[in-house]
Structure formats: C-alpha cells, structure tokens
Image: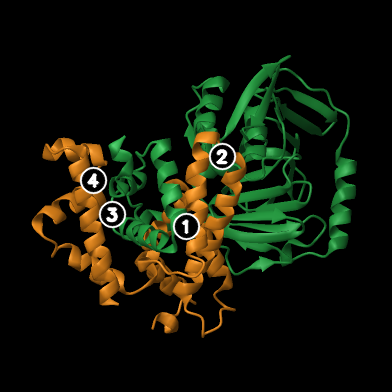
Amino acid sequence: MSSTVSIKSKKEFEAFFKLHYSDMVRYANKFVYRTDVATDIVQEAFIKLWEARETLLLTVSVKAYLYKIIYNLSLNYIEQIKVHARHHESIYTDLMQLEVDYYKDEKSLLQEERLVLLRKMLKELPKNCYEVIDLSRLQGLKNKEIANKMKLPLRTVETRIYRCISKLKDLAHRAG
Amino acid sequence: MKELNDIESIIIRSLDRTASETELAVLKEWLHNSDENKTLYFQIKDVWDSTADNQMPSETLAWKQLQSKLPSKSILPLWAKELVKVAAVAVLVAITTYAIFEMPETVQKNPSYATVIVPNGSQTTVELADGTTVRLNSGSELSYPSVFGEELREVTLKGEGYFSVKHDKEHPFVVSTNDLEVRVLGTEFNVMAYDDADYIETTLVKGSVSLNKKGASYRNGVILKPGQKAIYQNGQLAINKANVELVTNWMKKGLYFQRTSLKELAQRLERWYDVDIILSNEMDDLTFTGKFRNNETIWQILDVIKMTTPIDYKVKEDKIYITQINE
C-alpha cells in the first residue's frame, strides 16, 4: 500500500508532510482533546520521523510508523496530565485512558484508506443529516449553537447528530 | 432526570464537551458495562474526530515551523574533548575583577583594553575604533582594545550582542566567547553566549562568518551562510536554519519566546527586568510560546504566561517565586 513512499529528500518529506498533516492532528487530537497539544505532538512526531528516515526499514509503512509515534506521544501526554488533573477533570482523563487502551489493538478510520470514501459519503447523506453534520463537524458549532440556529430543541439536535454519525459509522465499516 | 437515561444524547454531549459531571459518570458506567458499548462509543467518536474540519491548522504554516526545527545533516563532532579543557582554562583566565556599575560604563582594564558592562534591565550600543557597532543586550559584557592590533580586530563577549562589522579585508574581526571564536570580514550577526546558558548561539544576518573552537585554527572552521545559525553545545556544533526575527527581536525591545523552557524564560526575564526569579523545580516539561512588545510590566507578562502554562507566582522579599501547579 503506502509502504513504498520515499521521504528521504526534503522535497519528498515536505510532500508527505502536507498530505498527512491534518489527519495526524485529528488523530492526536482524538486522544489529547486539545489542538495546541495535538499540533505540538504531531510536530515532534514528524521530527522523529525525519531523524529516523535513513534507518526506517522498507517493510514498515511510513504512515503506520508515524501513527505509532503519535500514539505513543499522546500516551505520554495523558500519563502526564493524569498526575496534574484537577478533580473535575479526572473523569475526562479516565475516558482518555480508556480510549488509548482501546486503540492499542484497534485502528482509527484515519489510519485506513476508507476515510476518503467516508468524506465522500458525507455529501450523500439525507438532507436533514448533512445539515447537522455540516454545522457540527465541518463548521465546528456546539450542539447548543446548532439548536439555536435551526430553532430545534437541544435534545432533538443531539439525537439527530447521533443517528447521522451512527449512519456514517455503519457506512464506513461496511465499505471496508 | 429523564435525560440522563438517554445515552445517545449523553454520548453526543461528551463529544461536544458540554456534558455535565453526572452525565459523564453515567457514560463511564455504561462503557464499563460491556465491550460492545465501548466499541460502539469509540467508533462513534472516531467518526466524530475524523470528520472534524474546523480550525485545522494550516499545513503550509506548520511546515514552515517544522522546517526550522528539522536538524540538518551536519551535527559535526568538530573538536576533541581536550579542547574543552583548554577553553575551561581560558574561562578562568578571563574572569578578572571588575566593578559592576549602575549604568553602562567604560572601565580601563589596562592601558589598551576597555570593558563595557551592561547591567540587567538595560541595553547599550558601543561604537568601536574601526566604526563597528555592537548592540549589547542586558547582562552582557564586551571587552575591546581602544586601538586594534596590527592584524586582527579582536573583542571578547559574554552575553548577547548584535554586531555590525565595518568591512576591512586586511583586518579580520574576531569575537571570542568562552568556547568559540567567530571570525568575520564585514557582516551583521548576533552572538549569544551567556555564562548561565549551556550553549552558544551565532546567527548570521548578512555576509559570511567562520566559526572555530577557541585555540583551533580558523582554517578548519565552519562557514555560516546568511539566515543560518550555529549552536555550540557540549563540544558539538550544529548548523540550522535560523529565525532571524526571533533571534534579533531583543534589539527592537521585544521579547519573543518559541517553545522556550521555563528555565530559559526565567533567565531572560531576570535580565530584562532586573528581577530575581526562583523556580520551585526544573519544570522540564513546560515551555512557553509568545511575543511581548516590552511595554508590559513583569506582572502582566507573568499573568499571560500563567494563562497558558500551569504555573503560579508569588512575591516574597523582592523575589519572584514561580511554582508549577499540580493540583
């Protein structure tokens, strides 16, 4: 698959970086819940990748290697904040821990080639789904803001988002 | 409390980060009920995370930032360890007695040498006999002869200075620091060699300079090109791309930090504001990024740092104590 990509020269590395950067940030953000931390982690991971590029075995997919570094750096970060977590944050750090444990064996859609397909499917969702997904995921509005905008009760919006995401999830997993 | 039973709503709220503590507790319990629940939740969250498209940082900008941090191929183990010892001896020799003045003042060390000492909290510009100007940052020291020698124009620097060297091919200009010598013809560059930092940084803005270990021949030195910086640390010299604005920002009376460790940040604030800062521990894992224009008070700066970094500060007996927040 992507195992033959070459990143030896700075030009190749730059192309690889630009192609995968935002997905890597999404992946890190999944674990750390903070874009600033996620971008720091991704930057560090790419530096490590650059340093290791000469010695990387050809059999290792560069992308897989990068995901692995990001996963490990996120894990470190979670270990760190667990120590400093204030009481009301501790439940989030519990969830974070549960999630990194889950991804020990599982892969994110981001890691698989299905994501492109998933994003395409997004546009083919029924109108009432596309509407909320667009506001929530693409424009980044909070549930409450969407409810205000669409003049719908908050709970209706929430269950609608749930159903639509769930639909996308099924589509993505079936597509694989 | 009917809403609490509605796990679909709670899931979406937790992803939106608007769930209450009680709701999160319900979610956590539900997740622990079965592996199916876990799988369902993490797959839903995965779609949520993967489709996030808002406020994604720009690749182009991120690449620019990354590029300056990619280590160049040449980490040159240039000099042998014995030379470090030679330099250490040179440091001892170089430490002579001098008075600290309130304002930058010229002291006659011997009939032909002068030393400018810039106290913490101020900066000064020195013009040398050959027309070269040196802007000196807080807490720096520059020694120079009142008349330059026959062959070389030699000065000694501790701290940080920005040199605009008058072009004179016949008489190379040499800046000596504890460990390194920077040799130039006519050029503009910044040298940072504070005693309390464990590295020496040379950034070239214009022209060309060569760097060599103190005591070694400049013929074996490393040539720096404009826009590059050399960092000398633990006996090794590494050449990297420089962010010239970042390096020379101090002259515009600004403070510019990029992933700067709290330790270095404290040292720079101490010099800039002439205050004593005490860190409660090493704070190795903390860095700060930000830019100040220098019309802020030290308190305003500390408050900004506090907002983005888990630290707190206290003032006691004229000293600022910074602690890391753990709880």
**Label 4 chain ID:** A
Location of residue B252 in the rendering, given as x and y in whole percent from the top left corner: 50, 32
Q: Are marks 1 and 4 in contact (CB under 8 Å)?
A: no
Which chain identifier belongs to the green chain? B
Q: Are marks 3 and 2 on the same chain?
A: no
Amino acid carrying label 3: it is: Asp
Q: Which mark is residue A85?
A: 2
Q: Is B312 above or below relative to A152?
A: above
Q: Which mark is residue A99?
A: 1
Judging depth in this view, the residue of A132 and B182 nearest the camera is A132
Q: Colour of chain A?
A: orange
Q: Is B8 above or below relative to B255?
A: below
**Label 2 chain ID:** A
Tell me the CA gap for discs 4 and 2. Answer: 28 Å
Tell me the CA gap for discs 1 and 4. Answer: 22 Å
Quarter-wise, where is residue B77 in the image?
Answer: bottom right
Q: Are marks 4 and 2 in contact (CB under 8 Å)?
A: no
Tell me the CA gap for discs 4 and 3. Answer: 19 Å
The crowd level at tag 1 (other Cα within 10 Å; few <14, some 14-19, many 20+) is some
What residue would you read off at disc 4? A158
Give the residue displayed 47% in from the left and 54% down from the top: B32
What residue would you read off at disc 3? B53
Amino acid carrying label 2: it is: Ala
**Could you tell which of marks 4 and 2 lies nearer the N-terminus?**
2
